[in-house]
Image: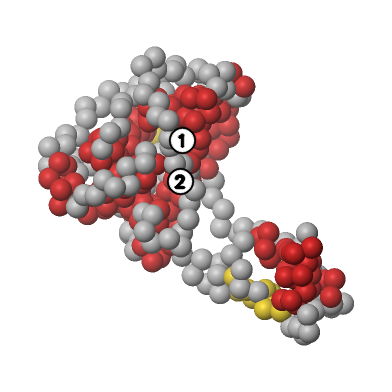
């Protein structure tokens, strides 16, 4: 509008060079467009995690910012490596960052299902199963205070660091052979399992998960100390593992793709507790009060411990 153009003119008139220090793509492209129209050199900057990067955009000599592309990722990993066979801390950080999306995805699905009971029927089989699993996980009990969030955090921990690891070892025992070769070799690390909840990484996971769930369920005034949380954790018991003979675990990405195509229907629970308000969490790495980076760090380190991978600090994980 007119007011916006006046602001643009006020900001950019009589400028000979523009230096960007912006934090989103839309703003960068907006400034890039103005510099292109006015023939101004633009010096774009960013962080690339903990690294700095700059990009000079010079009229008639270089591409504009909007026309240029980032270099292709050279450190991408096979899905199966991330999912079941990590061997480096980068693998476990990648897994944790991917898994964090449950705090946004699950609760957006819950809101859609709460407001439209036909929502699930509009999804593909894979997305429908994922939505049902998410709804079952987070709506099977009534969440009223931080202790309810802690017990839910324990369930998430047990699922990812006990049941799934035990099932992996049930499908591929430590001495499992494939084509006369040890399965757990050639870079595959055989995981161990947790026998208690008292390690610092585990407590970090339970504490950060509880805080994030409190934010999601709108329990922001539910303050508790780490000591109070640990007092409840003293009574936690590792659940009994019951192997699932029908569950297969892919040993490579090709097999994983085939299994996705053969997935069976998940069943929605009948007694669900649906709240009027949820606050899904969009990952934000630069807010030290939201527990997001703390969660990714603890989730990654718990996984690293099981696979005997050196853990990483919050600073390194954030990078």
| Quadrant for the N terminus in the image | bottom right
User: Which residue is label 1 attached to?
Assistant: 107
Q: Kindly identify the residue that appears in the image at 55 percent across and 70 percent down.
A: 47
Q: Kindly identify the residue that appears in the image at 22 percent across and 54 percent down.
A: 200
Whichever of callouts 2 and 1 sits on the residue coming sooner in the sequence is 1
- Relative to residue 160, is residue 39 drawn left or right? right
Please rate how many residues cluster around mark 2, counting C-alpha atoms within 10 Å: few if below 14, some from 14 to 19, many from 20: many
Q: Kindly identify the residue that appears in the image at 45 percent across and 46 percent down.
A: 281
Residue 274 in the image, given as x and y percentages of width and height: 40, 26
Q: Are marks 2 and 1 in contact (CB under 8 Å)?
A: yes
Give above or below for 287 relative to 56. above
Residue 249 in the image, given as x and y percentages of width and height: 44, 30
Q: Is residue 180 visible?
A: no
Residue 177 in the image, given as x and y percentages of width and height: 39, 34
Q: Give the numbered dot on residue 263.
A: none
- Relative to residue 194, is residue 53 drawn left or right? right
Q: Label 1: state its secondary structure.
A: helix
Residue 90 in the image, given as x and y percentages of width and height: 45, 56
Give above or below for 316 relative to 276. below
Colouring mode (rainbow / by chain / secondary structure / one colour): secondary structure
User: Which residue is label 2 attached to?
Assistant: 281
Q: Kindly identify the residue that appears in the image at 43 percent across and 27 percent down.
A: 135
How many angstroms separate mark 2 from mark 1 (CA)?
Answer: 9 Å
Q: Label 2: state its secondary structure.
A: loop
Q: Residue furthest front?
A: 3
Nearer to the camera, 42 or 156: 42
Please rate how many residues cluster around mark 1, counting C-alpha atoms within 10 Å: few if below 14, some from 14 to 19, many from 20: many
Give above or below for 205 relative to 176. below
């Amino acid at each position: 509008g007119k007011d916006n153009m006046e602001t643009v003119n006020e900001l950019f008139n009589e400028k000979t060079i523009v230096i960007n220090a912006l934090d989103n793509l839309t703003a960068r492209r907006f400034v890039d467009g103005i510099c292109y129209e006015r023939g101004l050199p633009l010096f774009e900057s960013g962080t690339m995690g903990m690294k700095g990067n700059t990009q000079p955009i010079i009229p008639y000599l270089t591409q504009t910012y909007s026309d240029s592309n980032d270099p292709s990722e050279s450190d991408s990993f096979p899905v199966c490596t991330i999912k079941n066979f990590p061997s480096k801390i980068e693998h476990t950080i990648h897994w944790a960052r991917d898994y964090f999306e449950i705090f946004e995805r699950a609760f957006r699905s819950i809101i859609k299902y709460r407001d439209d009971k036909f929502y699930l029927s509009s999804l593909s089989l894979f997305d429908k199963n994922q939505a049902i699993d998410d709804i079952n996980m987070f709506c099977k009990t009534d969440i009223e205070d931080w202790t309810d969030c802690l017990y839910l955090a324990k369930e998430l921990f047990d699922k990812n660091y006990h049941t799934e690891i035990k099932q992996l070892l049930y499908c591929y025992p430590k001495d499992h052979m494939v084509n006369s070769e040890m399965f757990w070799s050639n870079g595959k690390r055989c995981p161990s399992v947790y026998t208690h909840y008292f390690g610092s990484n585990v407590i970090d996971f339970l504490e950060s998960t509880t805080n994030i769930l409190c934010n999601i369920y709108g329990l922001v005034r539910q303050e508790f100390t780490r000591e109070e949380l640990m007092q409840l954790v003293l009574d936690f018991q590792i659940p009994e593992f019951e192997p699932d003979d029908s569950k297969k675990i892919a040993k490579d990405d090709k097999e994983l793709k085939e299994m996705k195509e053969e997935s069976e229907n998940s069943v929605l629970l009948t007694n669900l507790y649906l709240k009027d308000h949820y606050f899904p969490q969009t990952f934000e790495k630069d807010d030290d009060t939201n527990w997001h980076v703390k969660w990714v760090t603890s989730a990654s380190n718990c996984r690293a411990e099981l696979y005997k991978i050196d853990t990483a600090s919050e600073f390194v994980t954030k990078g």
